[in-house]
Amino acid sequence: MDLTKEVAENVKWLSNIGADPTGGTTRLLYSDFWLEAQNGVKQRLSDIGMVTSFDAIGNLFGRLEGSKYPTETILTGSHIDTVVNGGKLDGQFGVISSYLAVKYLKEQYGTPLRSLEVISMAEEEGSRFPFAFWGSKNLMGLAKKEDVSEIADFNGVKFVDAMRNAGFDFKDEEETLRKDIKAFLEIHIEQGNVLELENKSVGVVTSIVGQKRYTMILKGQANHAGTTPMKYRKDAIYGFSKICSQSIDKARLVGEPLVLTFGKVEPKPNTVNVVPGEVLFTMDCRHTDQNILNDFTAEIEEDMHQIADELGLELTVDLWMDETPIPMDKKMIEVIKNVAEKEGINYRMMHSGAGHDSQIIAPQIPTGMIFVPSIDGISHNPAEDTKLEDLVEGVKTMALVLYELAYVD
Amino acid sequence: MDLTKEVAENVKWLSNIGADPTGGTTRLLYSDFWLEAQNGVKQRLSDIGMVTSFDAIGNLFGRLEGSKYPTETILTGSHIDTVVNGGKLDGQFGVISSYLAVKYLKEQYGTPLRSLEVISMAEEEGSRFPFAFWGSKNLMGLAKKEDVSEIADFNGVKFVDAMRNAGFDFKDEEETLRKDIKAFLEIHIEQGNVLELENKSVGVVTSIVGQKRYTMILKGQANHAGTTPMKYRKDAIYGFSKICSQSIDKARLVGEPLVLTFGKVEPKPNTVNVVPGEVLFTMDCRHTDQNILNDFTAEIEEDMHQIADELGLELTVDLWMDETPIPMDKKMIEVIKNVAEKEGINYRMMHSGAGHDSQIIAPQIPTGMIFVPSIDGISHNPAEDTKLEDLVEGVKTMALVLYELAYVD
């Protein structure tokens, strides 16, 4: 098979389902386009001789029964949903790559010793409903009815109604978890610029960062910009600027893989001739080591309170996301690395700075992740792209790893 | 006359013309409420025996002819227009105070030696059309037809149509300026918190600050907050925060009367998990000394470029307002100060950090300004207020100064 041609055709085909007239793809959980995509993937999996099925909530599986160890399953895949006006690779390239890797292996080597399964997960982005990882959390028995029973999308459509309308429903909570899955492998675009800047085609993921997200409010006093002497001001944006510059200075000193971002800043009243009386801002901090993440954020929180006190400002801190770092499985990392070494693939070891389905699966199943570069680090955007040869290199790596896992005794 | 009762009644009456149902007053140039207010003031000036007239563009005058030096005119007043949802004192208290001071003087001392004129200026705020000081600039021959011939309000109504609709029109540009005005006196709320914090009833204004206003754009690169290592970032908000904190630190060191404000900050895309790729921000800097203002802003502009260079950011600087400081007339300051001393008025000398009609008039006519306190420094807001006894103290000071100017030989 011509892998380059297959990759190009499949990416084009799948990203076209839900394509926005203005560019990009919008394929939200349980929408018509979502259903069309899942059914399209189902057909393609079926066409290469896999036995296909949906679980209760809409995760799609294609299975190739193993000849020697049929009860040992090697699972591979990613998610089928996109963000609003998303790119053509996030999630869906993982589904396509798993499908093509299995297609290639079957053509080259026939039936595997262990069972091979491709999964096209229902949802990961949290972009229609305020709930993310619905696909992988259901797979791992971590989703609860009550998590979604009251939520609705931006048009007021309830999660439960959308799900049932698409022909799916809650899992039977009594259902026991599958014990046959011995490994999970996911490929994804990096969504950053490390591979590109360092001229690598493939990243071997060692862990997924933990992340904390905060919203802070600094309250001072709004005053006339001309008539209020500096000594009588309680300038919220001055407080923010001290916090932001000092914290990022410290983050740069701590060094990689720590990242710290002040992404949203909203002063009030936000006008040229009024001293800002209040500012709302967000902070996003990530690291692969829970202790370092905890210690660093504790230190800068303390700094913030000190700066606020010094300037007569009131600070409120709301930590609304606190996810622990998730290491990938040591043996899986070794397998991927060895394959890359042996085949002369231009790779590097790296962590993932973004969240992925693998972080939900890894605590229970040996999990490995492969990255391919993102041009200019862009993702969640119609401009999201990867050189075709890098995508092909990713599929090739995936196929070689699945060969090691499913075809070698 | 009961000055306290008169002040209270007049403020209530005038601020009621254009009162918003939700609080505050909106009385924009050439609106129906504006015309109602000017005609109301005209009536009250007429009722105390002043000869009233409008000039071509709608400045209202009330004149009391002097008995000995009728060709020497002492002018006093302020502006009648308000900002959208403004307070009950900005501008209009100046008109009321001038009217009541003249009423009091006439009742107490009869006809003045020099002519006394009250002016209710058409416009100062620039809150309906993008042009400010229309009243005082016309008075001083500084307004040009072409400044307003193309501008329109937020509803698309052209300046020229609004003016003609209200019954006014451009001045004859050949008209010579009045040579009879020997002094101008304006009273205004401070719009700051200095008098209140220092427990003073009256401020004697020594000068009006010069001000420079800028809009800056810092451009970096928007990146994923998780997947972009710190060393690969071009973080625009980090650049802003260094500029803001360092510049304000320096401004505080320079000391009074320098003020520096970063009032508007708009990062893009302004979301928690994206490194801001761009930030637009404003800077407002004021001082009473042109050299210090120039030197200080030149220094921090240089700092900004250096910070931008260090962080790999592009900086564009747009200086869109550059007004020179305007000193009040030395003799007028002396007269006001002497009156305050003699009468035991609780006053302080101070500069004005905000712009006023006096800054347009002062370069050509000896001009003095009196401030009364603003509670909590609030203005341009329905909560704008001043203790009644301070308003009365202001009117009293004004009357005593006008007495010195118009009744003493």
Image: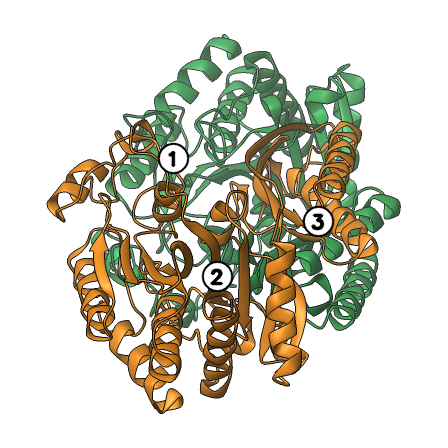
Chain colours: A green, B orange
At mark 1, the secondary structure is: loop
Residue at 14 percent across and 49 percent down: it is B166
Residue at 33 percent across and 70 percent down: it is A150
Circle nearer the viewer, 3 or 1:
1
Q: Amino acid at mark 2?
A: Leu
What chain is tagged by disc 3? A
Contact between labelled residues 1 and 3, with CB atoms less than 8 Å apart: no
Q: Amino acid at mark 3?
A: Val
Q: Is residue B194 above or below residue B354?
A: below
- Give the camera-side residue of B237 and A274: A274
Label located before the other in sequence (3 or 1) = 1
At mark 2, the secondary structure is: strand
Q: How many marks?
A: 3
| Residue furthest right as drawn | A253
Q: Is residue B10 visible?
A: yes
What residue is pinned by disc 3? A209
What residue is pinned by disc 2? B185
What chain is tagged by disc 2? B
What residue is pinned by disc 1? A85
Label disc, if present, on residue B18 of the rendered structure:
none
Query: In this image, A282 relative to B73: left or right?
Result: right
